C-alpha cells in the first residue's frame, strides 16, 4: 500500500486519471461508473475500446437513477460487468449498505472504491482557522435556508472505513485491500501552528494524532471477486 500527498489527486479530473492508473484495465471489457459525476473516466475508456457506462443523476449519464434508495437495484444482471468504479459516492447516500451490495452484485471481477476521510477534514478545519459561521464544515454543515445539494451522510474514522469495506466485501464474496492512501507526513497548517501542534501531540497526546487518522486523506480500495 502506497501513500501520497493530498495535492496529487486534488481535483476531480486528476482523481479520474489516478483512478484509471489504479484500474489499469485490459481492452474490450465493461466498466460501470457508479455516481459518475461528469464522466471523467469516459475519455480513458474510449482509448481502449471499453464499454463504459455511467450511472447517476446527471443528464449526461447513460443510466439516470437515484442511488440513494433502500430498494435500489442497478439495471444490470448479476456478474455481468467486469469492473465497477465508485469514487467518493458511498458517503453521500443514506442507504450505503444497499448501494455497496449492488456494486458487488453486478461485478464479475473487480471493484474500485474511494472514500474520503472526514476526520482529516474536521482536523484541518480546527488547525487552519478557516471556519466560517456562514458555511461551517464542508459537507457536514447545517444550512439555515434550504437543504444542501451536496452533503455527506456518514462521519467515520479511517479505521472504521477500512473495517466497513473489508467486512462488506467479504460478505459479498470479494477480497479487499487498501491499495492507496492519500496523506501527508505533516500537519496541513501554517508552519508556526504546525510546530505548536507537534509539541501538543508529543507532550499531551503522546503521539496519538497520527493514530487517530487525521493526517491521512482519501482511501482507495480494490475488491476482487473470489473465484471458486
Image (spheres, rainbow, N blue to C red):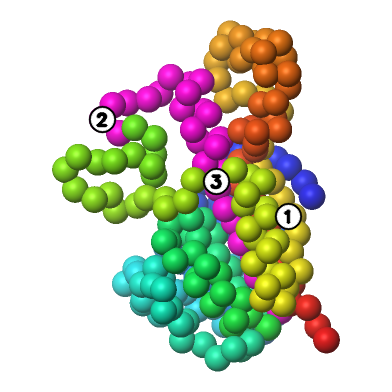
Q: Which residue is mark 3?
A: 156
Image quarter in which the C terminus is found: bottom right
Chain-order first, disc 2 or disc 1: 2
Inspect the magenta stretch and tell me whether residue 116 lies in it: yes
Which stretch is magenta?
A: 109-135
Q: Which residue is mark 2?
A: 134
Which residue occupies 44% across, 66% down? 95
Q: Does any portion of residue 180 appear in the rendered image?
A: yes
Rendering coords of residue 105 (x, y %)? 60, 81
Q: Does any portion of residue 9 appear in the rendered image?
A: no
Chain-order first, disc 3 or disc 1: 3
SS at badge 2: loop
Inspect the magenta stretch and tell me whether residue 61 lies in it: no
Which residue occupies 49% across, 64% down? 96
Q: Residues within 10 Å of mark 1 (few under 14, many from 20)?
A: some
Q: Which residue is mark 1?
A: 178
Position above or below: 126 against 139? above
Amino acid at each position: 500500500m502506497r501513500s501520497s500527498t493530498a495535492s496529487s489527486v486534488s481535483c476531480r479530473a486528476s482523481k479520474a486519471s489516478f483512478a484509471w492508473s489504479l484500474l489499469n484495465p485490459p481492452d474490450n471489457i465493461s466498466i460501470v461508473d457508479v455516481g459518475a459525476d461528469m464522466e471523467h473516466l469516459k475519455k480513458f475508456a474510449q482509448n481502449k475500446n471499453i464499454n463504459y457506462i455511467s450511472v447517476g443523476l446527471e443528464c449526461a449519464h447513460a443510466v439516470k437513477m437515484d442511488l440513494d434508495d433502500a430498494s435500489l437495484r442497478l439495471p444490470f444482471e448479476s456478474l455481468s460487468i467486469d469492473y465497477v468504479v465508485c469514487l467518493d459516492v458511498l458517503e453521500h447516500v443514506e442507504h450505503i449498505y444497499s448501494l455497496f451490495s449492488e456494486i458487488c452484485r453486478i461485478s464479475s471481477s473487480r471493484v474500485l472504491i474511494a472514500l474520503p476521510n472526514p476526520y482529516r477534514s474536521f482536523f484541518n478545519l480546527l488547525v487552519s482557522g478557516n471556519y466560517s459561521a456562514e458555511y461551517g464544515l464542508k459537507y457536514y454543515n447545517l444550512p439555515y435556508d434550504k437543504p444542501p445539494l451536496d452533503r455527506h451522510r456518514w462521519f467515520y474514522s479511517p479505521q472504521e472505513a477500512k473495517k466497513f469495506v473489508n467486512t462488506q466485501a467479504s460478505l459479498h464474496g470479494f477480497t479487499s485491500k487498501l491499495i492507496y492512501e492519500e496523506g501527508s507526513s505533516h500537519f496541513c497548517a501554517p508552519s508556526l501552528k504546525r510546530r505548536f501542534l507537534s509539541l501538543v501531540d508529543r507532550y499531551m497526546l503522546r503521539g496519538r494524532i497520527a493514530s487517530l487518522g487525521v493526517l491521512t486523506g482519501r482511501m482507495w480500495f480494490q475488491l476482487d471477486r473470489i473465484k471458486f
